[in-house]
Image: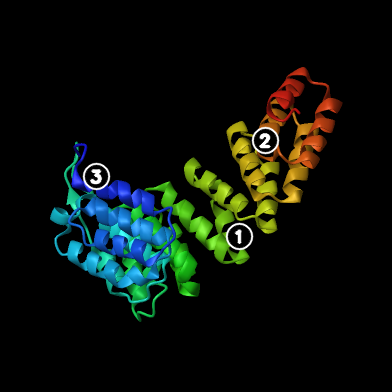
Amino acid sequence: MARGDPTERVLDRLGELRHEEPTARVVEELRGALRNRSNLVVAKAAKAARELCATELLPEMVIGFNRLITDAPKLDKRCAAVTELVTTLYEMDYDEPEPYLTGLKHVQMEGSYGPPVDEAAKLRAVSAQRLLRTRYPDALAEVVRLLVDREPAARAGAVRALAANGGESGALLLRLKVLAGDEEVTVLAECFAGLLSATEKAVPFVAMYLDAADDAVAEAAMLALGESRLRAGFEVLKEKWQRTVAAPVRKVLLAAMTASRLDEAVAFLISVIEGADVRTAQDALESLTIYRSNERIVAAVRRVVQRRKDRGLLAQYQRELGR
């Protein structure tokens, strides 16, 4: 856009409005921006309305969404505006299902340097997450279709939706998705995380994948168990550690244990620094650098490093945790 372009001026003004109080004047400016012909202006106005919690603009956003989605390839390149509008409706708890149903089914193929790209994957993902929070009776049936969507981002969005709002049926669908597999490990990682966030009973199921033939799937299972911060998850990781000799796998296990933020995990990692071979001790020390602001943990690490009297380990401690 050229300097002085009207659209550029509106975009600049919207950037200013995001930092103002949601007065009647500000709300009216945002209302006007939501009616703008530029999809970029509408997208930025929706984001500003979300940040200002201007719920009185919800009807205007629904109107804007319906206007753009009727001919989105022409009116809304890359789904910039409709995605922001649905995201705002979602985060501001708009309960009517129609925009989410429409967004869930929208596909928008656009040209790229290679094959055409579907720009609506994120829109479908956000729509799925919110649809399950409405009272639409067939929401689960609509969302489950996204588990086999051609785009990984849409599949991951369906997983997050089912994990957060799918209840017991959603959890069973996530188990089925894992059992069926997915070419994108990130989608399976979302399944693992979603199952573990729903219930501790999922730990044995996710643990089955610690020894997966695909190293990336096994790593995703390890990290999900650690990030769940469940004690049962840590115990599974510790058992895996005890029967693992491969250094790369052990390094992932250390990272997963550290991510758990459990006192038991920290104590275990410090014991590794104290008693394992130097290379493994160095990996454990590296994993604990996220605790560099925790004086108690840093002091405990310092004591075991000093007792070992290994110059390389001491130098690493000074670089990464020394104070």
Work out whether mark 2 precedes mark 1 in sequence or the reverse, and give the earlier one: 1
Q: How far apart in space, not on screen, are marks 2 and 1 (Cα)?
A: 29 Å
Q: Which residue carries the number 3 mark?
A: 8
Q: How far apart in space, not on screen, are marks 2 and 3 (Cα)?
A: 44 Å
Instruction: Name which residue lies at 77% across and 36% down.
Output: 298
Residue 230: image location, x then y, percent = 66, 57
Q: Which residue carries the number 2 mark?
A: 289
Work out whether mark 2 precedes mark 3 in sequence or the reverse, and give the earlier one: 3
- Counting the numbered discs, the total is 3
Q: Which quadrant, please, contains the N terminus?
A: top left
Q: How far apart in space, not on screen, are marks 1 and 3 (Cα)?
A: 54 Å
Q: Is residue 69 left or right of residue 179?
A: left
Instruction: State whether residue 314 is above or below residue 248.
Output: above
Pick whichever, 245 or 202, lies toward us: 202
Between tags 1 and 3, which lies in front? 3
Residue type highlighted by circle 1: Pro
Instruction: Name which residue lies at 42% across and 58% down.
Output: 51
Q: Which residue carries the number 1 mark?
A: 204
Work out whether mark 1 precedes mark 3 in sequence or the reverse, and give the earlier one: 3
Quadrant of residue 196 in the image? bottom right
Between tags 2 and 1, which lies in front? 2
Residue 241 visible in the picture? yes
Q: Is residue 176 left or right of residue 309?
A: left
Instruction: Name which residue lies at 14% across and 60% down.
Output: 71
Quadrant of residue 292 in the image? top right
Instruction: Name which residue lies at 39% across and 70% down.
Output: 55
Which type of secondary structure does the marked residue at label 2 adopt?
Answer: helix
Q: Is residue 144 left or right of residue 201?
A: left
